[in-house]
C-alpha cells in the first residue's frame, strides 16, 4: 500500500515545480488550460475558424498576431471590439485566462 | 442470345444487390466537425449507417440535397465543396472553390449549386452534375471593396439571393441563363447583415443586421419595391449582453400568422406578426437563443443557446407561448433537426460527443448515438424545401 502512494506524491510535487518554473505570472491550472484550448478551437472558432484562418472574425494565426502587443490583444479579448461582432469575454475569462490565450494563439503555449 | 442477356442482367443485378436496395427519404448527415467527417444516419430506426471522411475543415459546415435526395452537397469552411452519394456513403466529387466559405444553396431546378465565400468575397456557382464552375460573381460592393458574402439562399425562378456583410447590400441573382447571371443590387440596406433566410413560401428574403437594429426585407414577388426595413427594435437595443455566438435565422418558420426569431444579445425569443411584420410579443428563455426552430406542424418550438447556456434546450408550446420543458441533452448543443413530419428531433451535443433523439410528443429521449464533436444535422427532406 505504502509503495503505491509514494510515486503519486512524487508526481504531484513534480507538476507543481514544473508549473512554477515556467513563468512568474499566474498561469491557469492544467485543467483550465484544457478548457481554454477547447474554447479557442470551438467557440472562438465559430467566428475565427477552427483552424484560425478567419471567418466573420479576422484570422488569428500566429503570423497575424505577431505584430500586436499582448496587452492590446488581452484588451480585445476581454472588452471586445464595439461596433463589430467581437464580443467582450470578461464575464467568462479572467485576465490570466486571456493572457494565456494570447500566448497560445501566438504559438508560445501549446 | 436471349438467355445470355438474361444471365448478364442477373449478374449485373446481383452485383448491385451486394447492398440491399434502399431509398434515401429517411437519411441524413451529421457533421463531425473536428474530424472533417460526416455520419450517414437513418431516422426510421435512429441508426448510423456509415462514416464519410476526408472533407476538410467542417467548422460551420452546411449541407443541401439534390432534388432526388440522392446526393448531398457539403460546404466546408476551407472553401471545399463536396458531393456525397447518400447510397454508397462516398465522396463522388470535390472542388476547392475558394479559401474560406460560409455556406451555399441549390437552385430551384436542381442544376446549380452556389457557394458563398468570405475570401475572396463573392458567390461561385457550379453545375451539380460535374461540379464545374458556371458562374463567378465577385462581391464588389458599392464602396469599391470586396465584401464577405453571407445569407446565401435559393429563391423561386432559379434565383439566388445573398447579402454583402461589409458594404451592407443585398444582391438578387437571376440564373435562368447560368452563364449570364442578371444581378439586381440593393445598396444601403443597413450595417453588417450577418445571416438571412427565405420564408418557406419563397416570397420574402430577410437579412438580420448586426451593426444596427432591424431586419432588411425584400419581397421577391415585387423586388421593384426595394428593401423594406421591418422590426426596427430587432437587435441589441439598450444594454445588450455580449453575443458569444451569432444567432441563426434558418429555423424561422411561421405558425399561422406568427413567426419566431432569436433575439440578439437577449434571453428572449421574439414573436412577430407576419401580416404587419411587427413584434407582438417576447418569450423569456434560458439564455441567448441561437436556433429557434418550429416543429414542422408549427405547434412547438425548440430553442438552443449560446455560451454559457449551451447545455440547455427549451421546448416552447406555441399556442400558449410558454416554456413547457427544459432539457439538458449534453453540453455544447449546436444544432437541431426535426424528422420530416416532426415526431422526432435530433440534437447534437458537441462536448458530450453524442447526438440524442427525442420524441416531440412525450419530450423524452428515445436514442443516443455516439458522434465525434457533432455540429450540424441535415436530413434529406430539405431537398424539397425552398430556402434550405
Image (spheres, rainbow, N blue to C red):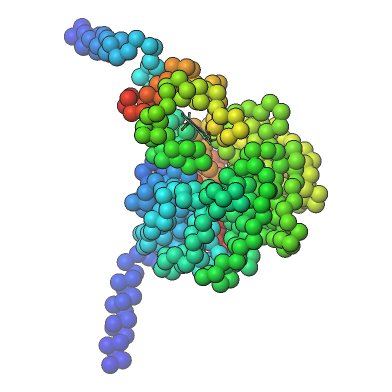
Residue that extends furthest to the front in the rendered view of this protein: B144
Please tell me in which quadrant of the rendered image residue B303 appears: top right
Residue that extends furthest to the bottom in the rendered view of this protein: B1
Q: Is residue B31 visible?
A: no
Q: Is residue B111 left or right of residue A33?
A: right
In the depicted structure, whether residue B95 falls above or below residue A109: below
In the image, residue A93 lies at what x, y percent? 49, 21
Residue that extends furthest to the top in the rendered view of this protein: A2
* Residue closer to the observer: A11 or A88: A88
Q: Residue at x 38, y 11 (%)?
A: A25
In the image, residue A13 lies at what x, y percent? 26, 8
* Residue closer to the observer: B90 or B18: B90
In the depicted structure, whether residue B78 falls above or below residue B373: below
Q: Is residue B262 left or right of residue B82?
A: right
In the image, residue B326 lies at what x, y percent? 61, 33
In the image, residue B84 lies at what x, y percent? 41, 59
In the depicted structure, whether residue A64 falls above or below residue B10: above
Q: Is residue B6 visible?
A: yes
Q: Quadrant of the N terminus of chain B?
A: bottom left
Please tell me in which quadrant of the rendered image residue B175 appears: bottom right
Q: Residue at x 72, y 47 (%)?
A: B259
Amino acid at each position: 500500500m505504502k509503495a503505491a502512494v509514494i510515486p503519486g506524491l512524487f508526481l504531484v510535487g513534480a507538476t507543481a515545480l514544473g508549473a512554477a518554473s515556467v513563468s512568474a505570472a499566474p498561469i491557469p491550472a492544467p485543467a483550465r488550460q484544457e478548457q481554454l484550448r477547447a474554447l479557442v478551437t470551438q467557440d472562438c472558432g465559430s467566428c475565427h475558424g477552427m483552424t484560425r484562418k478567419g471567418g466573420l472574425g479576422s484570422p488569428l494565426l500566429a503570423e497575424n498576431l505577431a505584430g500586436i502587443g499582448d496587452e492590446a490583444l488581452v484588451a480585445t479579448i476581454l472588452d471586445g471590439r464595439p461596433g463589430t461582432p467581437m464580443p467582450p469575454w470578461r464575464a467568462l475569462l479572467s485576465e490570466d485566462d486571456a493572457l494565456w490565450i494570447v500566448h497560445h494563439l501566438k504559438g508560445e503555449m501549446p | 442470345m436471349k438467355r445470355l442477356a438474361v444471365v448478364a442482367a442477373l449478374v449485373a443485378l446481383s452485383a448491385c444487390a451486394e447492398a440491399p436496395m434502399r431509398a434515401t427519404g429517411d437519411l441524413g448527415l451529421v457533421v463531425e466537425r473536428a474530424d472533417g467527417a460526416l455520419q450517414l444516419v437513418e431516422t426510421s430506426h435512429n441508426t448510423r449507417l456509415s462514416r464519410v471522411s476526408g472533407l476538410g475543415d467542417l467548422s460551420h459546415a452546411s449541407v443541401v440535397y439534390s432534388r432526388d435526395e440522392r446526393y448531398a452537397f457539403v460546404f466546408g469552411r476551407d472553401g471545399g465543396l463536396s458531393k456525397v452519394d447518400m447510397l454508397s456513403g462516398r465522396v463522388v466529387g470535390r472542388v476547392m472553390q475558394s479559401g474560406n466559405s460560409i455556406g451555399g444553396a441549390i437552385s430551384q431546378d436542381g442544376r446549380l449549386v452556389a457557394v458563398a465565400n468570405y475570401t475572396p468575397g463573392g458567390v461561385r456557382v457550379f453545375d451539380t452534375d460535374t461540379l464545374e464552375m458556371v458562374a463567378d460573381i465577385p462581391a464588389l460592393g458599392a464602396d469599391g471593396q470586396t465584401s464577405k458574402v453571407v445569407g446565401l439562399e435559393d429563391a423561386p425562378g432559379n434565383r439566388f439571393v445573398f447579402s454583402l456583410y461589409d458594404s451592407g447590400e443585398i444582391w438578387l441573382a437571376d440564373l435562368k441563363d447560368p452563364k449570364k447571371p442578371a444581378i439586381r443590387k440593393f445598396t444601403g440596406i443597413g450595417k453588417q447583415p450577418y445571416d438571412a433566410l427565405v420564408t418557406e413560401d419563397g416570397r420574402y428574403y430577410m437579412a438580420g443586421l448586426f451593426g444596427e437594429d432591424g431586419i432588411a426585407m425584400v419581397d421577391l414577388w415585387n423586388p421593384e419595391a426595394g428593401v423594406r426595413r421591418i422590426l426596427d427594435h430587432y437587435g441589441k437595443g439598450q444594454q445588450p449582453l455580449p453575443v458569444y455566438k451569432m444567432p441563426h435565422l434558418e429555423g424561422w418558420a411561421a405558425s399561422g400568422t406568427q413567426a419566431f426569431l432569436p433575439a440578439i444579445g437577449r434571453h428572449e425569443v421574439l414573436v412577430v406578426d407576419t401580416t404587419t411584420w411587427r413584434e407582438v410579443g417576447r418569450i423569456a428563455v434560458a439564455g441567448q437563443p441561437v436556433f429557434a426552430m418550429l416543429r414542422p406542424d408549427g405547434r412547438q418550438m425548440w430553442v438552443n443557446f449560446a455560451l454559457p447556456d449551451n447545455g440547455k434546450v427549451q421546448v416552447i408550446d406555441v399556442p400558449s407561448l410558454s416554456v413547457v420543458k427544459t432539457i439538458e441533452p449534453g453540453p455544447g448543443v449546436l444544432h437541431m433537426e426535426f424528422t420530416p413530419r416532426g415526431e422526432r428531433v435530433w440534437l447534437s451535443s458537441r462536448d458530450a460527443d453524442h447526438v440524442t433523439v427525442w420524441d416531440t410528443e412525450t419530450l423524452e429521449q428515445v436514442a443516443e448515438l455516439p458522434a465525434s464533436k457533432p455540429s450540424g444535422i441535415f436530413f434529406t427532406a430539405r431537398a424539397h424545401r425552398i430556402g434550405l
